[in-house]
Protein backbone atom coordinates (compact mmCIF):
# COMPACT_ATOMS: atom_id res chain seq x y z
CA UNK A 1 0.00 0.00 0.00
CA UNK A 2 1.35 3.42 -0.89
CA UNK A 3 2.44 5.63 1.97
CA UNK A 4 0.39 8.81 1.44
CA UNK A 5 -2.74 6.94 0.38
CA UNK A 6 -2.47 4.49 3.27
CA UNK A 7 -2.04 7.30 5.78
CA UNK A 8 -5.06 9.15 4.40
CA UNK A 9 -7.25 6.04 4.53
CA UNK A 10 -6.24 5.18 8.10
CA UNK A 11 -6.65 8.79 9.22
CA UNK A 12 -10.20 8.95 7.86
CA UNK A 13 -11.13 5.58 9.36
CA UNK A 14 -9.86 6.53 12.81
CA UNK A 15 -11.54 9.94 12.64
CA UNK A 16 -14.98 8.32 12.32
CA UNK A 17 -16.71 7.31 15.59
CA UNK A 18 -17.44 3.91 14.05
CA UNK A 19 -13.84 3.59 12.79
CA UNK A 20 -15.20 3.14 9.30
CA UNK A 21 -15.43 4.85 5.92
CA UNK A 22 -17.96 4.06 3.22
CA UNK A 23 -16.91 1.93 0.27
CA UNK A 24 -17.68 4.95 -1.89
CA UNK A 25 -15.06 7.06 -0.08
CA UNK A 26 -12.56 4.20 -0.17
CA UNK A 27 -13.02 3.70 -3.92
CA UNK A 28 -12.74 7.46 -4.54
CA UNK A 29 -9.38 7.60 -2.75
CA UNK A 30 -8.06 4.34 -4.21
CA UNK A 31 -8.73 5.53 -7.76
CA UNK A 32 -8.39 9.31 -7.54
CA UNK A 33 -6.06 10.22 -4.67
CA UNK A 34 -4.14 13.21 -6.13
CA UNK A 35 -0.75 11.51 -6.03
CA UNK A 36 -1.28 7.79 -5.55
CA UNK A 37 -4.76 7.05 -6.90
CA UNK A 38 -4.81 4.41 -9.60
CA UNK A 39 -5.96 6.71 -12.40
CA UNK A 40 -3.84 9.64 -11.27
CA UNK A 41 -0.49 7.86 -11.19
CA UNK A 42 1.91 7.91 -14.17
CA UNK A 43 1.37 4.25 -15.01
CA UNK A 44 0.30 2.43 -18.17
CA UNK A 45 -3.16 1.01 -17.51
CA UNK A 46 -4.58 -0.02 -20.88
CA UNK A 47 -3.29 -2.64 -23.29
CA UNK A 48 -0.71 -5.39 -23.10
CA UNK A 49 1.50 -3.50 -20.61
CA UNK A 50 -1.44 -2.43 -18.47
CA UNK A 51 -4.13 -4.14 -16.41
CA UNK A 52 -7.01 -4.35 -18.89
CA UNK A 53 -8.03 -3.92 -22.52
CA UNK A 54 -10.73 -1.65 -23.93
CA UNK A 55 -12.40 -1.83 -27.33
CA UNK A 56 -10.40 1.25 -28.31
CA UNK A 57 -7.13 -0.55 -27.59
CA UNK A 58 -7.98 -3.51 -29.85
CA UNK A 59 -7.48 -1.64 -33.14
CA UNK A 60 -8.03 1.85 -34.66
CA UNK A 61 -11.03 0.44 -36.56
CA UNK A 62 -13.14 0.83 -33.41
CA UNK A 63 -12.62 4.61 -33.32
CA UNK A 64 -12.90 4.79 -37.11
CA UNK A 65 -16.32 3.12 -36.94
CA UNK A 66 -17.53 5.59 -34.31
CA UNK A 67 -16.14 8.46 -36.40
CA UNK A 68 -18.01 7.16 -39.45
CA UNK A 69 -21.21 7.15 -37.40
CA UNK A 70 -20.51 10.63 -35.99
CA UNK A 71 -20.13 12.03 -39.50
CA UNK A 72 -23.50 10.51 -40.49
CA UNK A 73 -25.07 12.02 -37.36
CA UNK A 74 -23.56 15.40 -38.14
CA UNK A 75 -24.93 15.37 -41.70
CA UNK A 76 -28.39 14.19 -40.60
CA UNK A 77 -28.41 16.87 -37.92
CA UNK A 78 -27.17 19.59 -40.26
CA UNK A 79 -24.53 20.77 -37.76
CA UNK A 80 -20.70 20.85 -37.79
CA UNK A 81 -19.23 17.88 -35.96
CA UNK A 82 -18.91 18.59 -32.22
CA UNK A 83 -17.74 15.53 -30.29
CA UNK A 84 -16.99 15.30 -26.56
CA UNK A 85 -15.16 12.31 -25.11
CA UNK A 86 -15.40 11.89 -21.34
CA UNK A 87 -12.49 9.99 -19.85
CA UNK A 88 -10.24 9.74 -22.89
CA UNK A 89 -7.42 7.68 -21.39
CA UNK A 90 -4.30 7.92 -23.52
CA UNK A 91 -6.01 9.84 -26.30
CA UNK A 92 -5.66 6.91 -28.73
CA UNK A 93 -9.37 6.87 -29.53
CA UNK A 94 -9.38 10.63 -30.18
CA UNK A 95 -6.34 10.39 -32.45
CA UNK A 96 -7.80 7.56 -34.56
CA UNK A 97 -11.18 9.34 -34.67
CA UNK A 98 -9.71 12.64 -35.86
CA UNK A 99 -7.32 10.94 -38.29
CA UNK A 100 -10.32 9.30 -39.95
CA UNK A 101 -12.37 12.52 -40.13
CA UNK A 102 -9.40 14.41 -41.59
CA UNK A 103 -8.80 11.73 -44.20
CA UNK A 104 -12.39 11.05 -45.24
CA UNK A 105 -14.03 14.48 -44.80
CA UNK A 106 -11.34 17.18 -44.88
CA UNK A 107 -13.91 19.96 -45.26
CA UNK A 108 -15.85 18.69 -42.24
CA UNK A 109 -12.59 18.29 -40.33
CA UNK A 110 -11.86 21.99 -40.75
CA UNK A 111 -14.90 22.80 -38.58
CA UNK A 112 -14.70 19.83 -36.21
CA UNK A 113 -14.35 20.51 -32.48
CA UNK A 114 -13.26 17.69 -30.19
CA UNK A 115 -13.70 18.17 -26.44
CA UNK A 116 -11.91 16.01 -23.88
CA UNK A 117 -13.32 15.91 -20.35
CA UNK A 118 -10.43 14.60 -18.26
CA UNK A 119 -9.89 14.35 -14.52
CA UNK A 120 -6.37 12.89 -14.49
CA UNK A 121 -3.49 15.31 -14.98
CA UNK A 122 -1.28 12.41 -16.07
CA UNK A 123 -3.72 11.31 -18.76
CA UNK A 124 -4.12 14.85 -20.00
CA UNK A 125 -0.35 15.11 -20.52
CA UNK A 126 -0.37 11.84 -22.45
CA UNK A 127 -3.33 13.02 -24.53
CA UNK A 128 -1.65 16.33 -25.37
CA UNK A 129 1.41 14.45 -26.61
CA UNK A 130 -0.55 11.91 -28.65
CA UNK A 131 -2.87 14.53 -30.17
CA UNK A 132 -0.36 17.27 -30.97
CA UNK A 133 -1.08 17.22 -34.71
CA UNK A 134 -4.78 17.90 -34.10
CA UNK A 135 -4.12 20.73 -31.65
CA UNK A 136 -6.31 23.31 -33.36
CA UNK A 137 -9.41 21.13 -33.01
CA UNK A 138 -9.08 20.19 -29.34
CA UNK A 139 -10.54 21.70 -26.18
CA UNK A 140 -9.73 20.17 -22.79
CA UNK A 141 -12.27 20.39 -20.00
CA UNK A 142 -11.76 19.64 -16.33
CA UNK A 143 -14.26 18.32 -13.83
CA UNK A 144 -15.79 21.20 -11.89
CA UNK A 145 -15.18 24.53 -13.61
CA UNK A 146 -14.79 22.76 -16.96
CA UNK A 147 -18.51 22.15 -17.08
CA UNK A 148 -18.97 25.85 -17.77
CA UNK A 149 -17.20 25.34 -21.11
CA UNK A 150 -19.13 22.20 -21.94
CA UNK A 151 -20.70 22.36 -25.43
CA UNK A 152 -24.45 22.96 -25.40
CA UNK A 153 -24.95 20.82 -28.51
CA UNK A 154 -23.15 17.80 -29.86
CA UNK A 155 -22.26 14.15 -29.29
CA UNK A 156 -21.08 12.95 -25.88
CA UNK A 157 -19.09 9.72 -25.94
CA UNK A 158 -18.22 7.80 -22.77
CA UNK A 159 -16.43 4.48 -23.24
CA UNK A 160 -15.95 2.62 -19.95
CA UNK A 161 -16.30 5.80 -17.94
CA UNK A 162 -19.12 5.10 -15.51
CA UNK A 163 -17.77 1.76 -14.27
CA UNK A 164 -14.95 3.74 -12.64
CA UNK A 165 -17.25 6.07 -10.69
CA UNK A 166 -17.18 5.47 -6.93
CA UNK A 167 -20.23 3.58 -5.64
CA UNK A 168 -21.86 3.01 -2.29
CA UNK A 169 -22.27 -0.69 -1.49
CA UNK A 170 -25.13 -2.08 0.58
CA UNK A 171 -26.10 -5.54 1.77
CA UNK A 172 -29.46 -6.87 2.95
CA UNK A 173 -28.98 -8.11 6.49
CA UNK A 174 -31.30 -9.98 8.90
CA UNK A 175 -32.61 -6.68 10.29
CA UNK A 176 -32.47 -4.49 7.20
CA UNK A 177 -29.95 -2.84 4.92
CA UNK A 178 -26.34 -2.48 5.99
CA UNK A 179 -23.80 -0.23 4.30
CA UNK A 180 -20.53 -1.88 3.38
CA UNK A 181 -17.36 0.05 4.10
CA UNK A 182 -13.77 -0.25 5.18
CA UNK A 183 -12.14 -0.52 8.58
CA UNK A 184 -8.54 -0.94 9.72
CA UNK A 185 -7.13 -3.97 11.52
CA UNK A 186 -4.28 -2.45 13.50
CA UNK A 187 -2.96 -5.81 14.68
CA UNK A 188 -2.44 -7.08 11.13
CA UNK A 189 -1.91 -3.62 9.64
CA UNK A 190 -4.44 -4.14 6.87
CA UNK A 191 -7.72 -2.76 5.59
CA UNK A 192 -10.77 -4.93 6.18
CA UNK A 193 -14.41 -4.89 5.16
CA UNK A 194 -16.77 -3.51 7.78
CA UNK A 195 -20.56 -3.15 7.71
CA UNK A 196 -22.68 -0.65 9.64
CA UNK A 197 -26.44 0.05 9.67
CA UNK A 198 -27.48 2.08 6.64
CA UNK A 199 -28.00 5.75 7.53
CA UNK A 200 -27.40 7.56 4.22
CA UNK A 201 -30.69 9.12 3.13
CA UNK A 202 -29.80 9.33 -0.57
CA UNK A 203 -28.88 5.65 -0.64
CA UNK A 204 -32.19 4.74 1.06
CA UNK A 205 -34.09 6.83 -1.49
CA UNK A 206 -32.32 5.03 -4.35
CA UNK A 207 -33.15 1.59 -2.96
CA UNK A 208 -36.82 2.51 -2.77
CA UNK A 209 -36.89 3.10 -6.54
CA UNK A 210 -35.84 -0.44 -7.42
CA UNK A 211 -38.96 -2.57 -8.03
CA UNK A 212 -37.55 -5.68 -6.36
CA UNK A 213 -37.93 -7.68 -3.17
CA UNK A 214 -34.36 -8.52 -2.23
CA UNK A 215 -33.41 -11.64 -0.26
CA UNK A 216 -31.12 -11.57 2.76
CA UNK A 217 -27.52 -11.48 1.63
CA UNK A 218 -28.28 -9.44 -1.49
CA UNK A 219 -25.47 -6.97 -2.17
CA UNK A 220 -25.63 -4.17 -4.69
CA UNK A 221 -24.02 -0.89 -5.66
CA UNK A 222 -25.64 2.54 -5.45
CA UNK A 223 -24.16 4.91 -8.08
CA UNK A 224 -24.86 8.32 -6.56
CA UNK A 225 -21.74 9.90 -8.10
CA UNK A 226 -22.66 8.73 -11.60
CA UNK A 227 -26.23 9.98 -11.16
CA UNK A 228 -25.00 13.45 -10.13
CA UNK A 229 -22.62 13.54 -13.12
CA UNK A 230 -25.39 12.65 -15.55
CA UNK A 231 -27.77 15.23 -14.06
CA UNK A 232 -25.15 17.95 -14.37
CA UNK A 233 -24.19 17.03 -17.92
CA UNK A 234 -27.81 16.73 -19.00
CA UNK A 235 -28.60 20.20 -17.64
CA UNK A 236 -25.66 21.70 -19.56
CA UNK A 237 -26.64 20.36 -22.99
CA UNK A 238 -29.59 21.77 -24.93
CA UNK A 239 -29.43 19.28 -27.79
CA UNK A 240 -27.28 16.19 -27.67
CA UNK A 241 -26.72 12.57 -28.51
CA UNK A 242 -25.08 10.49 -25.79
CA UNK A 243 -23.27 7.23 -26.52
CA UNK A 244 -22.45 5.46 -23.26
CA UNK A 245 -20.51 2.21 -23.66
CA UNK A 246 -20.06 -0.02 -20.64
CA UNK A 247 -20.82 -3.34 -19.01
CA UNK A 248 -23.94 -3.14 -16.91
CA UNK A 249 -27.47 -4.22 -16.10
CA UNK A 250 -31.11 -3.19 -15.79
CA UNK A 251 -33.07 -3.20 -12.55
CA UNK A 252 -35.01 -6.15 -13.96
CA UNK A 253 -31.78 -8.17 -13.95
CA UNK A 254 -31.62 -7.64 -10.20
CA UNK A 255 -35.26 -8.61 -9.78
CA UNK A 256 -34.62 -11.90 -11.56
CA UNK A 257 -32.11 -12.82 -8.89
CA UNK A 258 -28.95 -12.02 -10.80
CA UNK A 259 -25.92 -10.34 -9.30
CA UNK A 260 -26.74 -11.46 -5.76
CA UNK A 261 -23.31 -10.55 -4.44
CA UNK A 262 -22.91 -7.35 -6.42
CA UNK A 263 -20.41 -6.56 -9.15
CA UNK A 264 -17.46 -4.82 -7.47
CA UNK A 265 -14.08 -6.28 -8.42
CA UNK A 266 -10.53 -5.19 -9.12
CA UNK A 267 -8.17 -5.79 -12.02
CA UNK A 268 -4.42 -6.20 -11.91
CA UNK A 269 -2.19 -7.38 -14.75
CA UNK A 270 -5.21 -8.56 -16.77
CA UNK A 271 -6.50 -10.73 -13.95
CA UNK A 272 -9.68 -10.27 -11.95
CA UNK A 273 -8.64 -9.75 -8.35
CA UNK A 274 -11.33 -10.35 -5.75
CA UNK A 275 -9.57 -8.56 -2.89
CA UNK A 276 -10.45 -4.92 -3.50
CA UNK A 277 -9.02 -3.86 -0.11
CA UNK A 278 -5.50 -5.06 -0.84
CA UNK A 279 -2.97 -2.63 -2.36
CA UNK A 280 -5.30 0.32 -3.06
CA UNK A 281 -3.92 2.62 -5.72
CA UNK A 282 -2.14 -0.22 -7.49
CA UNK A 283 -5.24 -1.91 -8.93
CA UNK A 284 -8.26 -0.82 -10.90
CA UNK A 285 -11.55 -1.07 -9.00
CA UNK A 286 -14.76 -1.27 -10.99
CA UNK A 287 -18.48 -1.98 -10.74
CA UNK A 288 -21.12 -2.72 -13.37
CA UNK A 289 -23.21 0.23 -14.51
CA UNK A 290 -26.93 0.43 -13.75
CA UNK A 291 -28.31 1.75 -17.04
CA UNK A 292 -31.74 2.41 -15.52
CA UNK A 293 -30.19 4.71 -12.91
CA UNK A 294 -28.33 6.67 -15.60
CA UNK A 295 -31.39 6.79 -17.82
CA UNK A 296 -33.64 8.12 -15.07
CA UNK A 297 -31.11 10.86 -14.23
CA UNK A 298 -30.79 11.83 -17.90
CA UNK A 299 -34.58 11.97 -18.35
CA UNK A 300 -34.76 14.57 -15.59
CA UNK A 301 -32.58 16.73 -17.83
CA UNK A 302 -34.87 16.31 -20.83
CA UNK A 303 -33.25 13.26 -22.45
CA UNK A 304 -35.06 10.24 -23.80
CA UNK A 305 -33.76 6.72 -24.18
CA UNK A 306 -33.14 5.72 -27.80
CA UNK A 307 -32.02 2.21 -26.94
CA UNK A 308 -29.68 -0.12 -25.10
CA UNK A 309 -27.84 -1.92 -27.88
CA UNK A 310 -25.32 -4.78 -27.60
CA UNK A 311 -21.95 -3.44 -28.75
CA UNK A 312 -21.56 -5.91 -31.61
CA UNK A 313 -24.92 -4.89 -33.10
CA UNK A 314 -24.10 -1.22 -32.52
CA UNK A 315 -20.88 -1.62 -34.51
CA UNK A 316 -22.82 -3.30 -37.31
CA UNK A 317 -25.31 -0.43 -37.35
CA UNK A 318 -22.37 1.99 -37.44
CA UNK A 319 -20.90 0.29 -40.52
CA UNK A 320 -17.89 -1.61 -39.23
CA UNK A 321 -18.19 -4.18 -42.04
CA UNK A 322 -17.40 -1.42 -44.54
CA UNK A 323 -13.85 -1.43 -43.15
CA UNK A 324 -13.19 -5.05 -44.17
CA UNK A 325 -10.61 -5.31 -46.94
CA UNK A 326 -10.00 -8.14 -49.34
CA UNK A 327 -6.36 -9.19 -49.48
CA UNK A 328 -4.20 -12.15 -50.42
CA UNK A 329 -1.24 -11.51 -48.16
CA UNK A 330 0.08 -14.54 -46.28
CA UNK A 331 1.66 -12.42 -43.57
CA UNK A 332 -0.74 -12.53 -40.58
CA UNK A 333 0.72 -9.21 -39.39
CA UNK A 334 -0.07 -7.38 -42.60
CA UNK A 335 -2.14 -4.26 -41.75
CA UNK A 336 -5.16 -5.51 -43.70
CA UNK A 337 -5.02 -8.91 -42.00
CA UNK A 338 -4.73 -7.31 -38.57
CA UNK A 339 -7.68 -5.00 -39.23
CA UNK A 340 -9.91 -7.79 -40.54
CA UNK A 341 -8.97 -9.93 -37.54
CA UNK A 342 -9.81 -7.04 -35.18
CA UNK A 343 -13.23 -6.61 -36.81
CA UNK A 344 -13.91 -10.33 -36.39
CA UNK A 345 -12.91 -10.10 -32.73
CA UNK A 346 -15.13 -7.06 -32.12
CA UNK A 347 -18.12 -8.90 -33.63
CA UNK A 348 -17.46 -12.37 -32.23
CA UNK A 349 -19.77 -13.74 -29.50
CA UNK A 350 -16.56 -14.68 -27.69
CA UNK A 351 -14.91 -11.31 -28.27
CA UNK A 352 -14.68 -8.15 -26.19
CA UNK A 353 -18.02 -6.73 -27.41
CA UNK A 354 -19.95 -9.53 -25.70
CA UNK A 355 -19.43 -7.80 -22.35
CA UNK A 356 -20.59 -4.35 -23.45
CA UNK A 357 -23.74 -2.47 -24.34
CA UNK A 358 -24.20 0.97 -25.87
CA UNK A 359 -26.74 3.14 -24.07
CA UNK A 360 -28.03 5.75 -26.52
CA UNK A 361 -29.75 8.85 -25.11
CA UNK A 362 -30.99 11.88 -26.99
CA UNK A 363 -32.30 15.37 -26.38
CA UNK A 364 -33.51 17.87 -28.96
CA UNK A 365 -32.18 16.01 -32.00
CA UNK A 366 -33.98 15.48 -35.35
CA UNK A 367 -35.83 12.21 -35.91
CA UNK A 368 -33.43 11.51 -38.78
CA UNK A 369 -30.64 11.10 -36.21
CA UNK A 370 -32.63 8.71 -33.99
CA UNK A 371 -33.44 6.57 -37.02
CA UNK A 372 -29.75 5.84 -37.48
CA UNK A 373 -29.97 3.55 -34.43
CA UNK A 374 -32.84 1.36 -35.55
CA UNK A 375 -31.95 -2.32 -35.26
CA UNK A 376 -32.19 -4.21 -38.55
CA UNK A 377 -30.57 -7.28 -36.96
CA UNK A 378 -32.09 -10.13 -34.96
Image (tube, rainbow, N blue to C red):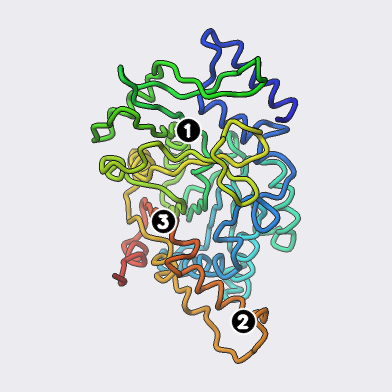
Q: Are marks 1 and 3 in contact (CB under 8 Å)?
A: no
Q: Which residue is mark 3?
A: 357
| Disc ID at residue 336 | 2
Identify which residue is drawn at 61% across, 61% down.
57
| Disc ID at residue 167 | 1
Q: Point out the tag, 1 or 3, that comes first from the N-terminus.
A: 1
Identify which residue is drawn at 69% across, 47% down.
123
Measuring from the top left, give residue 98's x and y in whole percent: 62, 65
Residue 205 lies, with reference to residue 324, above or below; the image says above
Q: Is residue 185 left or right of residue 198?
A: right
Identify which residue is drawn at 69% across, 62% down.
134
Q: Nearer the viewer, residue 10 or 156?
A: 10
Residue 371 lies, with reference to residue 33, above or below; the image says below
Q: Is residue 317 left or right of residue 327?
A: left
Measuring from the top left, give residue 369's x and y in whole percent: 37, 63
Q: Are marks 3 and 2 in contact (CB under 8 Å)?
A: no
Q: Is residue 66 left or right of residue 190?
A: left
Name the quadrant of the N terminus.
top right
Badge 3 marks a residue whose secondary structure is strand
Q: Residues within 10 Å of mark 3 (few under 14, many from 20)?
A: many
Q: Nearer the viewer, residue 136 or 177?
A: 177
Q: Residue furthest front?
A: 188
Amino acid sequence: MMAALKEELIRRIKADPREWISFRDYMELALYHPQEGYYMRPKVKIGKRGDFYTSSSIHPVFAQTIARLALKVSKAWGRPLCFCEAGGGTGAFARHFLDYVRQREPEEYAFTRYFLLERSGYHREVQEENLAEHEGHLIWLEEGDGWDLFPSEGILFANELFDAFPVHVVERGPKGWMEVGVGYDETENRLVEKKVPLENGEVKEYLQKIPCLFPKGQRLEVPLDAIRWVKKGASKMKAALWLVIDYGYRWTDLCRGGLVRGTVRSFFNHQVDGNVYDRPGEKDITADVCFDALGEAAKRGGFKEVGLIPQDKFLLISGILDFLEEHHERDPFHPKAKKNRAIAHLLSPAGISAAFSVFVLAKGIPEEVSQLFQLPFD
